[in-house]
Image (cartoon, rainbow, N blue to C red):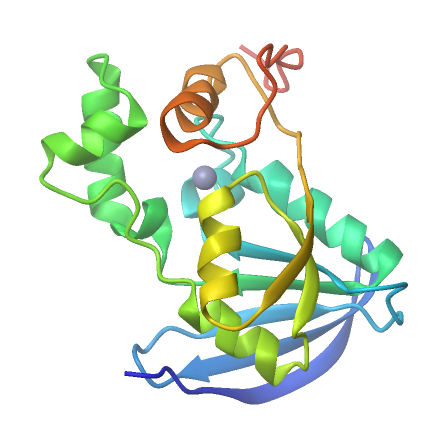
Amino acid sequence: MAIFVKAEARSIVPTIWGDLELIVYSNSATDDEHIVALSPKPPVGDPLVRVHSECITGEIFGSLKCDCGDQLQDALKQIATNGGAVVYLRGQEGRGIGLSNKIRAYKLQEDGLDTIDANLELGLPVDNRDFTVAAAILLDLGFKEIRLITNNPAKVDALKASGVNVTEVVPQIVGITEENENYLSTKRDRLGHTLPRDLGHEPHKHEN
Ligand SMILES: [Zn+2]
């Protein structure tokens, strides 16, 4: 069934990266509201886009187990500078398994399982995200051809399959820490993410 999206409200908001228009979308499939941050700057060439899944642990609580917070801020900065949009998908916590299951999987990771085997141990999919809603939002914005900020080839394929052509993939190497190095190398080695062989994490950002 096709997902219908609707822009419900929009306003230009001053941010630390400059003015961005925030547009709230509803969708016909779930109760989740999604948020687009759209740069008022006209893009040079195809617009730069990041499709970003909500991550409360990384973005709100400063968890170092993933790189989501840094990825989101870097993407907002890039689109504010160069034009384009960040499509922020709510309801896709933990690659779509939900917040409780994500924390259950973290508990298993305390005992040594990696991010993939922890999901499988819980009887859950490795990646349960649905990017058709992101494609529907991009098409509503008039973004049929985009340059996508991602390290995830599956995201490129999913958007293409839903009618959004990715003309360039822009890799994003930010937020690598001692605590998420294993998580990122698992995504590189087992999910095909385009990350460097040597992750060379940055120094600690938190006080011990
Ligand atoms: Zn995260």
Q: Residue at x 54, y 89 (%)?
A: 8
Q: Residue at x 52, y 44 (%)?
A: 59
The answer, for residue 113, to whether it is visible in the render is yes
Q: Nearer the viewer, residue 207 or 17?
A: 17
Does residue 58 lie above or below 83 as drawn?
above
Quarter of the picture for ligand 1?
top left
Total labels: the figure holds 0
Q: Nearer the viewer, residue 51 or 144?
A: 144
Say which quadrant the N terminus sits in: bottom left
Q: Residue at x 52, y 63 (%)?
A: 160
Residue 82: x and y, percent?
A: 86, 57
The answer, for residue 60, to whether it is visible in the render is no
Residue 196: x and y, percent?
A: 61, 19
Would residue 160 appear left or right of 45 to someone viewing this image? left
Would residue 101 appear left or right of 176 to someone viewing this image? left
Q: Residue at x 9, y 40 (%)?
A: 123
